[in-house]
Amino acid sequence: MSYDDPGRAAPGESSSAIPAAVLENVFDDPAHGEPGRDRLVVHLVWETLLLVALAAGTYLLWQEAPDTLRGDGLRDLLTDVVVLGLLTLAAGLSLRAATVNLAIGPVAVAAALHMAEQGDRGLTAAGGPALAVATLGGLVLALVVVVLHVPAWAAGLAGAAGVVVYVEQRTGAVLPQGTYDPERDALPLFAGFAAVAVLGGVFGAVRAVRRMVGRFRPVVDPARRRGLVAALVAVGAIVGSTVLAMLAGLLLGTAGADPVTPGTGLDWTVLAVGTSLLAGTSAYGRRGGIFGTLLAVSLVTVVLAYAEARGWTVDRWALGAVTLGIGLVVTRVVEAYGRPASAPEPLPATDGRISTGWTVPRADPPATWPPAMPERSAEEPVDPWDGSRWETGPRRWDTEDR
């Protein structure tokens, strides 16, 4: 089955009069001529606002519960940041590739249950099979999306339903059986998450990388295939997001965590997708910021810690709904101001003789000279001695005879 779009112009060609060099520099999808060389200013402005909000939330948390930001409290907070951060990275990766994976929450819960039950065998022995299953499951989900060319969110819901069937086989909470406590490595884990998030944003800001990662994003009819490269990128994004969700679930099932309660895990999906949108990642794919994921995950974790310190009951569904609502507004802002306001005007076509872009109007062809006499019908023979051809009025002598 071919992934090439039959209606796509050849590289360097366009239906407009814009040269290929201009298309490559101005358009982020030159094959289809979609205007939009993404601008990062809107992301930097939004990330500055996120930084201000994070600073204010951290200050309020310090005033309410200072122990949360030092010692064991800080390590516990950093572990929570890593868990939510891995899920947000999973959502953000699939969003950037325009193949949002809604199965990440159930995958995390299933991995947490597996880790809680098999953790006594060791982290490697328990995590190896989980990694293999997550990779295989993500690959199956990706092939459904790219081979059938169906919406990723619909395929993800189908995959989530299958994982929930596995989760619902447990009737009660499972106490973690392992001995590994991620809080002991909270600082290295947080540093690793921060490095992946920021470096991913930096590479995503490179135009060539951004084009490739967001290649699956439709620009015309969504039923048209986006090519083999887009299919391969979509497969990698879906498999990668599934593996990241599995890693987050392993941390949820370790010794330092609470007993793992079986559930659908869709609340984790809503919170992760909402946090990714809050970070500045577009719901349409391709566009995203640099520091947004790190700042948004930290802000949501601080808000949850502050609510717990104040004794408020805020579950993941409620916070996920809020982040998702704000994130949709952020998507609208990113799409509106992350691209040029209008497409550039087509350049004037040249006549092939001047390469400067200026055009000279062609002169009209010279007229025939002398003017040609009107043609006579072949039915009327021409008498060259007929005097009537030279007379335009009555003769004088004919008038006098009368």
Image: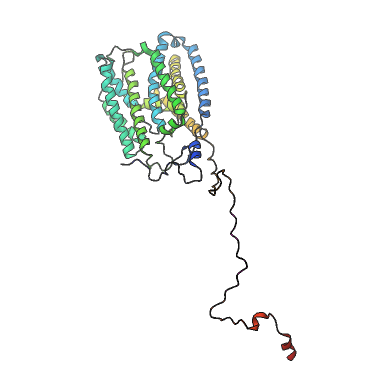
Q: Image quarter for residue 132?
A: top left
Residue 106 lies, in percent from the top left, at 32, 26
Percent coordinates x, y for residue 328 in the rendering:
46, 31
Q: Specify whether residue 85 is painted magenta.
A: no
Q: Is residue 365 magenta?
A: yes
In front: 91, or 367?
367
Horizontally, residue 186 falls left or right of residue 292, namely left
Q: Is residue 388 left or right of residue 340?
A: right
Residue 219: percent from the left, percent from the top?
A: 43, 40
- Relative placement, left or right, of 117 versus 376 is left
Q: Is residue 335 above or below residue 312?
A: below
Where's residue 151, x and y in %?
A: 36, 37
Specify the quadrant that holds the N terminus: top left
In the rendered view of the protein, which quadrant contains the C terminus?
A: bottom right
Q: Quadrant of residue 375?
A: bottom right
Q: Main secondary structure of the magenta part?
A: loop
Vertically, is 106 above or below 179? below
Range drawn in magenta: 362-375
Which residue is painted at 49% across and 46% down in the image?
A: 16
Residue 171 seen: no
Residue drawn 58% across and 81% down?
A: 382
Task: Name the outermost residue toward the right.
Answer: 400
